Image (cartoon, coloured by chain):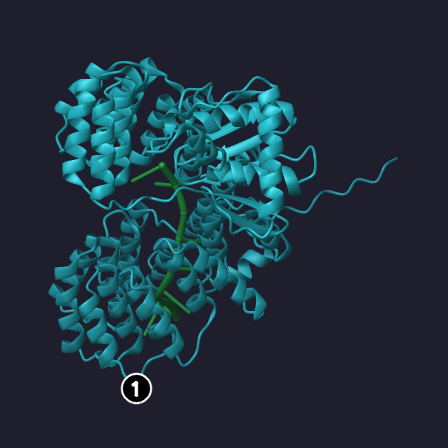
Amino acid sequence: MFAYKPKPPKPLLSVRHKVICDPLLPSTPTFRSLNQTKQSHARIIVSGLARDAKLMAHLLLSLALSPSPPLHYSLSIYNHFNYPSVFATNNMIRCFAKSHSPRQSVVLYSSMLRRYAKPNNHTFTFLFQACSEALAVEEGAQIHAHVLKFGFGADLFIRNALLNFYSACFRLECSRKVFEESLGSRDLVTWNTMLACVVRDGQMGVAEKLFDEMPRRDVISCSTMITGYVQNGNLEEALEFFRDVREKGLRVNEAMLVSVLSASAQLGLLEHGRFVHSLAESLNFPMTTSLGTSLIDMYAKCGCIEQSKILFNNMRQKDIWTWNVMICGLATHGLAKEALALFERFLNKGFAPATVTFIGVLSACSRAGLVREGRHYFKLMKENYGIQPEMEHYGCMVDLLGRTGFVDEAVELIEKMQVSPDPVLWATLLGACKIHGFSELGEEIGSKLIQLDPTHSGHYVQLSTVYAKAKKWEEVIRVRRLMSERNTNKAAGWSLIEAQGKVHKFVAGDRDHESFKEIHKMLETIGTRIAEAGYSPNISSVLHDIGDEEKEIVIKEHSERLAIALGLLVTPYGDCIRVVKNLRVCEDCHEVSKIISKVFEREIIVRDGSRFHHFKEGTCSCHDFW
DNA sequence: ATAGGGTTAG
């Protein structure tokens, strides 16, 4: 005989659920999943308590607390109240505020007033959230008047929400006024909101002063500063501030990590990015979608696209940012086929592509010269998704068509544009003219660009290259003379490499580095060994008015050569050399990098102004199409 | 019974 013991029936809700979540026992509000809320709703109906207004309002609260409240469901509950309480209405306003139609919050508020129901202090904080979301300046200002009318002018919560509202609507002056009026009754949130407001306006100097003035600071004050630096392009300052936070033993939050990863990515600092990654792990930060996405972006922008792929595939929750980052990452690495395949997967998942998604898709096509695909997706974007092409989309198409030799089609596309082309677009077309020898069109565009921006040295260089290719030497000299006469601001090219825990930044002909002598010796060695391999310099990309021998010296000391030389010197054999530079790599450096990768048996990864080049065993991943 | 500030893509 065997003992048989029936299993006890499973309770509908676990004990933990009952204590924390069941609205039959209202307690402190906690976020619950939609399913949990629906279960509670079912239990309420089954228990015959559906007419209990308090219970139903509490149910509405749990919907309002979710990140994206289901509007239809919330409304069906709200509409069942004969006389909705302020509490219930507040929660419905809150649901609308988080929805795609935040203006409905204001509509509901008006109907509440028509019923002669009086708003309370909570009502206004939710309303200002809604107006911030909707950028509803007029409505918000009217509600501001209501705040005073109903006697809530001194409520700190409301004032902070108001401050934030004006800030969100870019009404810096109004925010300032509310802030000044709050003198004497400010709390940390008031200060942080004002700080965020100044940061949003791009005034980091003022933000620094405000930060120093604050009577108290917390983790949000610090993360606001760091994200502010990143958003305003002060990347090094962001990293410095973050290091300071760490050194002082202050708290770190996810927003900081995300922003610092973005800074590392933009600067191309792989070692730093890795450090932030390990920090996130050691501090036990959960791998959220935004953190994961930032990591994928960082690894892609620092040359480790394989690492990005691994993270992407392991991520359970992906949002549109995750997909966009991955598609764009594959594109900058020239992995066009993978980018397009991923885009198709993205569509199959039912995601709606954004304008950036198509920039990723089209730039993937342009970098790989996939003309047929490029034309297809450009059409798809307009016709299937109703996305109006922006300057960047045109940029990709003109680049794609122009570089693959369809210059006429590129011109046609520009002529049909709704918006007038910007200098970058003209410069893209000029580049195509240069490659394919359209000297007359190139001349026209080059002159136009110089007219548009006479201080930009790049335009003169481009135009003189067009002339040089057409062997119009007098014109070359004329343009060069013009360039020197007009005192143009030369955008200095730089390259950087991380080594031995430091960032080394070089400009062409740099002599400032502490190991300058060794670097120079290495340049000599490189010169000898690549010459043995059959290399002779291509000096056509040097346009300075100097002799050939000098040209060779200048080209030998292009910033990326210095960086690669340092890489060869200080990193162990077998390690990959990673260089980041701001401008596009010149033809000669590209050739030299290929040969170095072969004779020194080193993989070299260069991120230039527009894409990645993986040099390995004498070839480049761009297949010399860039 | 309910509340406020910070985040990533070209």
- Judging depth in this view, the residue of A604 and A160 nearest the camera is A604
Residue in the image at 59% along x and 34% along y: A524
- Judging depth in this view, the residue of A374 and A91 nearest the camera is A374
Amino acid type, mark 1:
Gly
Residue matched to label 1 = A184
Residue A429 in the image, given as x and y percentages of width and height: 24, 25
* Chain ID at mark 1: A
Residue in the image at 13% along x and 72% along y: A145
Residue A328 in the image, given as x and y percentages of width and height: 41, 33
Residue in the image at 28% along x and 15% along y: A436
**The color chain B is rendered in:** green
Residue A70 in the image, given as x and y percentages of width and height: 34, 46
Residue A78 in the image, given as x and y percentages of width and height: 27, 55
Q: Is residue A422 among the parts visible in the rendering?
A: yes
Q: Which chain is cyan?
A: A
For residue B6, above or below residue A401: below
Residue in the image at 52% along x and 46% along y: A269
For residue A623, above or below residue A15: above
Indicate the secondary structure of the residue bearing disc 1.
Answer: loop
Within the image, what quadrant is residue A164 found in?
bottom left
Residue furthest right in the image: A1
Position of the C terminus of chain A, as image quadrant, is: top left
